[in-house]
Image (cartoon, rainbow, N blue to C red):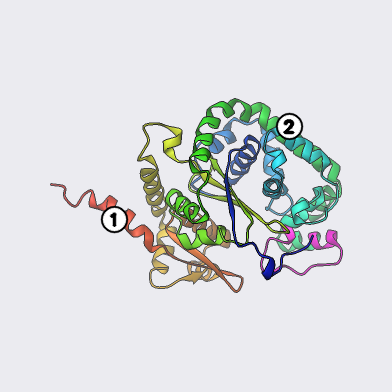
Amino acid sequence: MPRLTAAELPTKTDVEFTFSPALDMINAMYFTRFVIDSEGVEGWPVELRTQMAPDLLAELDFLYSFPNGAGMMGHFGDMLFNYPETWESVDKVVDFIRNIPAGLGPSEQEAGIQGLSYYVACTREEPLPPMSDDPREALRLKIASDGVEGVDAVMDQWDRPEELRERMITLVQRFYEEHYKHELPKRRAALERSAAAHRGISREETIDLIHRITSRPRMCLEDVCNATYERLVLMPSLDMGPYMSCAALKGPHPVHGMFYQCEAEFISEDAAHANDIQRTARMYKALSDEQRLRILHMLRDREMYAQEIVEQTGLHQSVVSRHLMLMRAVGLLTARKQNNMKFFSLNPEIRGQLTETIDLFTGAR
């Protein structure tokens, strides 16, 4: 697939707010798996883990973690932002899966069944791990270096793409029939109201909107909404808690897809101030953990990169990553990348919001 040169980069980003039942369902599936790895997810995904048939839940967990914790279904969901013909219905998604090539596919944005696993495992890290001329060997080396148990069993499954295809189709169809179809009518109205309310706004207004909804610093959102993308597709969601879910798709027509948390006023008519209260509650919940408070104190005087925080706290890297992810999601931290490292610092914009809660008591008698 051809790559854009600097001179060819688009100077305008088209912003599209829309609701897709198919992509909304795929996103809900992702966050049902995400509950295992992170704190802060609320509502339906948490309930689903207690309601789903054990075999269906096992398939969801498998396909969203195969081959190395980063799952092929996650990459598949990202890829769908490039295929609006699939957004209309779950049947369109199933037809799309049936027509995906079995192998790697021509590119990351046009991945085949094996490519969904290969690209999510081997190309998402910076710097990239050492690659072999043989994609199968590259994948095997990558998952072995990640400490995945049963490497031979993983590769045996990768060698059977038609079986993986049928497992994907069965997961999508069963999740829809057993869970999502019954939820869709009450979800649709709120999500369509949110999307309709924001259509026609500019890229700059989109940054302000997402800043208000998420409390993320504007500088972080400018990276998401930058002009190197021809299209910015935004879809509201009810399933993410404080998180955002993004897909960055490069290529000849680069697209950035984003799910954002649907505002409370579109869910309930009498919830005009619920968003601010909910965001503040999430921040104080994040502050209630001793280890997270330790990390915040470490960041009081300077920014630090993730591995430095791991070394100074003595906590496992996965634990630190989970704490940092939640604190960034609720707006306590900002993050920036430099030389393939991610640096974290306190978010100064959040001080006023926290102070407002403390001020409730300053005039008390």
> Which residue is the site of mark 1?
355
- Is residue 127 shown to the viewer in this render? no
Q: Is residue 232 left or right of residue 347?
A: right
Q: Is any part of residue 158 visible from this angle?
A: yes
Rendered location of residue 317, percent (x, y): 57, 62
Percent across and percent down for residue 341 are 58, 70
Residue sitting farthest toward the left: 365
Q: Residues within 10 Å of mark 2 (few under 14, many from 20)?
A: some
Left or right, residue 86 beside residue 200: right
Query: In terms of depth relative to the viewer, which is nearer, 120 or 184?
Result: 184
State the separation of the CA atoms marked 2 and 1. Answer: 49 Å
The residue stretch that appears in magenta: 121-139
Residue kind at label 1, given as amino acid type: Thr
| Label number found at residue 91 | 2
Residue 26 percent location from the top left of the image: 65, 40
Query: Could you tell me the amino acid type at mark 2?
Result: Asp
Give the answer, above or below, for where 130 lies relative to 271. below
Residue in the picture at 82% in, 47% down: 157
In the picture shown, does residue 269 fall above or below 107? above
The image position of residue 304, as x and y in percent, is: 48, 71
Magenta stretch encompasses residue 297: no
Main SS, magenta residues: loop
* Quadrant in which the N terminus is drawn: bottom right
Q: Residue at x 80, y 41 (%)?
A: 165
Q: Which mark is residue 188?
A: none
Q: Secondary structure at mark 1?
A: helix
Position of residue 277 in the picture relative to residue 139 (left or right): left
